[in-house]
Image (spheres, helix red, strand yellow):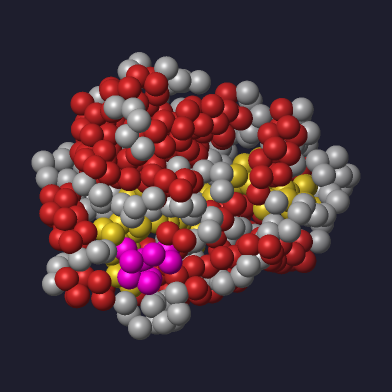
Amino acid sequence: MATPISRRTVLGLAAGLPLSMALASCGTSGPGTSGGATYWYLNGQPQEGIRTGAVDRFTKANPDEKISPTTFQNDAYKTKIKTAIGAGQAPTIIWGWGGGSLRTYVKAGQVEDLTSWFDQNSKIKDRLFPTSFPAATVDGKIYALPCETVQPIVMYYNKKVFDSVGARPPQTWGEVMDLVPKLNAKGIAPFSLGGQSRWTNMMWLEFLFDRIGGPEVFQAVFDGQKDAWSNPAAIEALTKVQDLVRADGFIKGFSSITADSNADQALLYTGKAAMMLHGSWSYGIQQSQGGDFVSSGSLGFMNFPAVDGGKGDPSDTVGNPAQYLSISSKATDEQKKIAKDFFAKGVLDDEEIKQWIGTGGVPVVKGTQDLLAKDKNADFLKFTYDLANNAKVFAQSWDQALSPTAAETLLDNIAKLFQLSITPQQFATNLNAVIGQ
């Protein structure tokens, strides 16, 4: 999803580690390092240690194939990697989020086409969730290897709150709207929301677009179709979310609450809000910061409800289908070979899979059910695995799927939409103006 570092260091947070552990950039190896390949990725524990461990195991097993890593803080990385790629000084292996940024690199000829490599190594592709590949694909060709973990968006709810009001979690949008006045009458906010962060608001639209019109509604935007935001299903989704705002569906003052502070999550586990739409990484944060909320079984979770009469498949989900590794087109043949060997032998090896599970994550690998079942968080991990594996479509977060220019316009207008300062039609007009940028 978008910019906030808390979402990019979610594994560290899920393990209960402080945000301060996402240290400044370190390491010395850059794209010009002689002898072997170079690899840039994010720092912050425990994810940095897992990535570095994979490199260490590979180079130990393949001493003639050196990989020199450099780590960066989240925001610094985004600037550094964009500058380096644009200057033809990219590292051999480029860590990223796929989607819009990858598409930009592809259009400029800056990353390697891996389609034929995947054809020759079909077992590698077959072991990964199929839903992880759309964000790695541009114009029918694959330019990145999906890696690390799946991070779908989840509807969380407080079971104690629902028991106290004699209600059940909503299965349809109609039930959502029926619950709102009942919960407000009890002095409980229906939904927690860190609306100042903007991307949290975006998740509501991502699901409503899908549930009402199906994945093709946003796909038309991604494909650059003129006036795609004016699709009747899009206008209906924009209208429904404003209906929810007007009905006091969200905690009062939501537009001044930041997701980075985790205040939105505290509202759920303290019972001040009944439900919350958030990423799968939220489970670990609630576990580490919510006392016995998770261990006592008070936390419930489900996929986003269906919309009555909608065309979308209720098994669909949105979020981060994976993280992604690309290879610089400027790398030498030797460096490209090392990178591809690392992709084949080093990425998501058995040890790395175990370590991601240990952080509360679900690796983007099929067939890990037995390992997940042995973890203390087995129920949630199984839910996440099934959600990612069974989804007909796992749509990438819009602010990652779109170009940086279009994404910023999107987030700005989403904030205005939730503040009721623009209409759905004005939203569509403003976003139509940046389609294809």
Q: Is residue 153 left or right of residue 362?
A: left
Q: Position of residue 120 (x, y in %)?
A: 54, 44
Q: Is residue 370 left or right of residue 246?
A: right
Residue lying at 73% horizontally and 32% vertically, measured from the top left: 83
Q: Does residue 313 appear anywhere in the picture?
A: no
- Which stretch did the figure color magenta? 265-273
**Image position of 175 with respect to 393: above or below:** below
Residue lying at 35% horizontally and 16% vertically, measured from the top left: 226
Q: Position of residue 244 (x, y in %)?
A: 24, 45
User: Is 106 in front, or is 65?
Assistant: 106
Residue lying at 21% horizontally and 46% vertically, measured from the top left: 247
Q: Position of residue 217 (x, y in %)?
A: 29, 31
User: Is 369 in front, or is 80?
Assistant: 80
**For residue 335, what is the image quadrant?**
top right
**For residue 420, what is the image quadrant?**
top left
Q: Is residue 269 magenta?
A: yes
